[in-house]
Amino acid sequence: MLPPLLTSLAALSTLLGQSVALPPGTASTKSIDWRNFKANGVNLGGWLVQESFIDTAWWNANSGGATDEWGLCANLGSRCGPVLEKRYASWITCADIDKLASANINVLRIPTTYAAWIRLPGSQLYSGNQQKYLRDIATYAIKKYNMHIIVDIHSLPGGVNGQGIGEADGHYGWFHNQTALTYSYKAVDAVINFVQTSGFPSHFTIAPINEPVDNHDFSAFGSPFALSDSGAAWLTNFTHGVLDRVGKVNKQIPVMLQDGFKGEKYFSQFFDKKENLVFDIHSYYFAGRGVSSANVTAFECTDAKDAAGDGRFPIFVGEWSIEAQYNNTFSARQKLLAYGLTAFSKHTSGSAYWTAKVAGPNDNKVDGQGTRSDYWSYEKFIDLGFTKNLKVYAGYCN
């Protein structure tokens, strides 16, 4: 083990941009090893998957009062396609990638609906030109900045968690559903083909599911009780199928398993240590944990250390944000961001903040000062200078 100071500096090297060995415009052909890689990432939320809070003005203008993308498209009818195509072309552009790169971002986690990959009979989710827009942005990020791309299938047929992001509010039908499983594998196969034919397969990780939860009691969401043992067994079998499919095409492409809040240690026994598998852990503080802005840093450090699991597989914190459940303050934001980035980089393979940008000001008030756009928008943090001088926090969370 490195001495604490050297460990701190090594963990921060990616955040400071020191880990990028290649000059801009040079895309590496070497696949990453998540055991050694350090991600300084963001999510591109609200782009190929719609959420009401990310851009409330857009949502209110187009949703017809719907609470999720499924309902938005149902309400829009034939207008859903044109509305979403315009969204795909405008919400994330090359200018956003340039700004993120200026803060040494080296990973983009990009959520997509399953409708980006397959057409599912009866689904209200729109199938259009998502792959084109994804390819354009991914290629730009890879060729210009040598970034790594996580293609996240954020929803699966039938619904994976009862939320709009999982298919639609109230939909839990993916579990123990052979038809849903068959269509899910078709979506996975389409992603594999997309990656393998991208021209840069070494720059991709495939995340075939997000936040799988079968407990209908939403108060359990975010805890180990959110996913039952039987649901976890279904998820494990699905993941084995994904690993098999990816391995037959290109074993160098990592598969990323979102843990349904049960932790790597729960699942590691079910997988061969040699699998090219990385676990995705999500850490939030805005609900259910009684966190205030005064003690977010303590939770960040504890979460980072706990995420490590039994050490059999690498860990990536695929989503997190600094909003606290209580008493959010503008003055605490830079410290909370820097502490989280430091803690997750030190004890895991790094993280991806949720999310790149949130339109604001908006009507999503937080407890304390401001709105969610003040706490969830990484581009705003860049504008405020919060991503600079992170080395001053190198001694935190040893």
Image (tube, grey):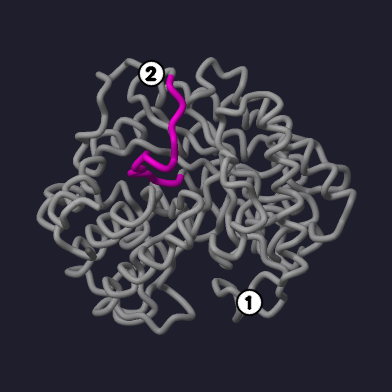
On residue 225, the disc is 1
When the figure is inspected, residue 28 is found, relative to residue 12, above or below; the finding is above
Q: Name the residue nearer the viewer: 176 or 159.
A: 176
Q: Which residue is mark 2?
A: 27
Instruction: Decide whether the magenta segment is chiefly helix, strand or loop.
Output: loop
The residue sitting at 15% across, 49% down in the picture is 6
As shown in the figure, which amino acid type bears the numbered disc 1? Answer: Phe
Q: Which residues are magenta?
A: 30-43
Q: CA distance from mark 2 to mark 1?
A: 42 Å
Q: How many marks?
A: 2
The residue sitting at 24% across, 48% down in the picture is 11
Q: Position of residue 233 (x, y in %)?
A: 75, 61
Q: Position of residue 246 (x, y in %)?
A: 67, 32
Snapshot quadrant of residue 212: bottom right
Q: Earlier in the sequence, mark 2 or mark 1?
A: 2
Can residue 386 be seen at all in this image of the molecule?
no
